[in-house]
Amino acid sequence: MRITIAISCYNQEVDIRKCLESVMAQDYDDVEILVVDDHSTDNSREVVKEIFASHPDKNTRLVVHDINKGLSFVRNTCIQEASGDAIIFIDGDDTMVEKALGLFGRKMNETNADVVCGSFRMVDEQGGIIREQKYPAADIKGEYAFSTYIEQYIKDKQWFPITMWNKLYRLDWLRNNNIFCDTNFKFSEDKIFSFNVVLHSKKMATISDLTYNWTQMPTSISHKKTPDRLNDLRMSVEGVFKAFDDFKRSHSDESIPQGVLYILNFVCLTIGTIKYVLMSDISKTQKKRFIIEVKNIYKEYHINRHQVVGVYNKMSYLILMSPFPCRLFLLYYKHLNLIVQIVNYKRSYRKILGDFFDEFEIFL
C-alpha cells in the first residue's frame, strides 16, 4: 500500500525544513511525499527543492498554486494530486513522530479501515511538550463506526480531534464519498470535512501511540482572527448543519446515533467555534455578533436540548441560548478546569449517590 504524505506549505521557509526532515526519516518504504505550496512569497519552495534534491531515493513531488487560494484549496489539491492508496495530511509547521508512518500503515493493512486516527502532543516552538492527547486503541466496524467510537471512548471524557491531520485516509474512500474541503471559504477546512468523515466511515481504527507533534505557533494562520476568518467560522457552522440536514433526510430522528449528535455540537459549540472565537483578542462587538449568528443557526435548524449530547456540549448549548451568552461563555472557559473537576467528582460518586444527580444532568 502506497501512502501519500500531503504537506501544506505557505511562507514556512524555516518550519518546512523540520517538517520534511521528520517525514524523510519515517520507517515506511512505499511513500509519496507531496508538498502543495500555496503561492509562498518567501523561500519556502527553494527549501523544499533543496531537501528533495538531497534525498534522490525518495518519491517526491512539489505542486505550486499560481495564486494564494487558502488551506481548503491546498487540502483538495492534495487529494486530487495524490498517487497513493492512502493519504495523511501534515501542516508545514508540524512534524511526525519517529516511526509513526509505519504504525499507520500497519494498522490500516491489518484493519482495512477507511480512516486510522493517531494520538498527538502539543509542543511549543522549541519542541517542548505542552500536553499529550492519547486515544484508546480500537478497531471498529459498522455503519456508524466513528459514532460508536465516540460513544464508547470519547464522549464527556476528552475532546475529539476534529482536525484533518494525523489521520490516514483511504483515498478511494474519500473520492467515492466526495469528501473534500468546502472551498466557499479559505479557512476552517477541518470542520465539515471531519464531520463528513464521521458520517460516512464504516471502518475506523485508532492508534494510542503518539504519532504527531502539533506546534503551537503564534504566527500560524490558525491563530489569526480577522473579519474574514470569523465569517468563515460562521459559514463552517452552517456547512456542518447542512451536512447534518442531508444526513437526516435518509435517517429517522430515532436512528441518528448519539456520536453523530455529539460531534455536531462539539464542532459547532464546545471547541470548534465558540471557544475559538471567545478566547481570541477580537473586539467584543465581533464576538457578540458571531455568538448571535451561531444562536440563530441553532434556532433555524430547530436544535433543542434533547439533541445536544455530552456534558460540556449541554453546558455550551445552555449558555448559547441564555440572555447573556458572551459574558457567561467567558466565565465558563475561564473556570473550565474547575468545572471539569466538578463533573469528574460527580462521576466518581455516582455509584454511591445513585441517580441523585440525574435531574441535574442538563447542568452538569
Image (cartoon, helix red, strand yellow):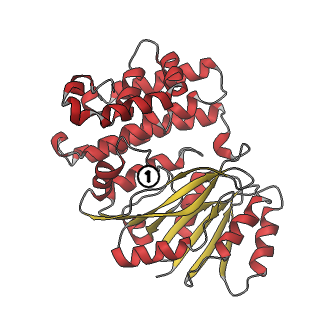
The answer to whether 335 is drawn above or below residue 197 in the figure is above
Image coordinates for residue 243, horizontal then vertical, percent: 36, 45
Q: Residue at x 71, y 60 (%)?
A: 66
Q: Is residue 313 visible?
A: no
Image coordinates for residue 355, horizontal then vertical, percent: 18, 29
Closer-to-camera residue (338/290):
338
Q: Residue at x 33, y 41 (%)?
A: 262
Query: Badge 1: few (under 14), some or many (20 or more) residues near its Cα, within 10 Å?
Result: many
Position of 256 compared to 155: left or right?
left
Q: Residue at x 82, y 68 (%)?
A: 46
Q: Quadrant of residue 357?
A: top left
Position of 292 compared to 302: left or right?
right
At numbered mark 1, what does the secondary structure look like: helix, strand or loop?
Answer: helix
The answer to whether 82 is drawn above or below residue 283 in the figure is below
Q: Which residue is mark 1?
A: 194
Q: Residue furthest top?
A: 323
Amino acid type for the residue under numbered disc 1: Ser
Figure disc tally: 1
Image coordinates for residue 255, horizontal then vertical, percent: 17, 46
The answer to whether 18 is drawn above or below residue 135 in the figure is below
Q: Residue furthest bottom?
A: 57
Image coordinates for residue 79, horizontal then vertical, percent: 52, 66
Closer-to-camera residue (131/107):
131
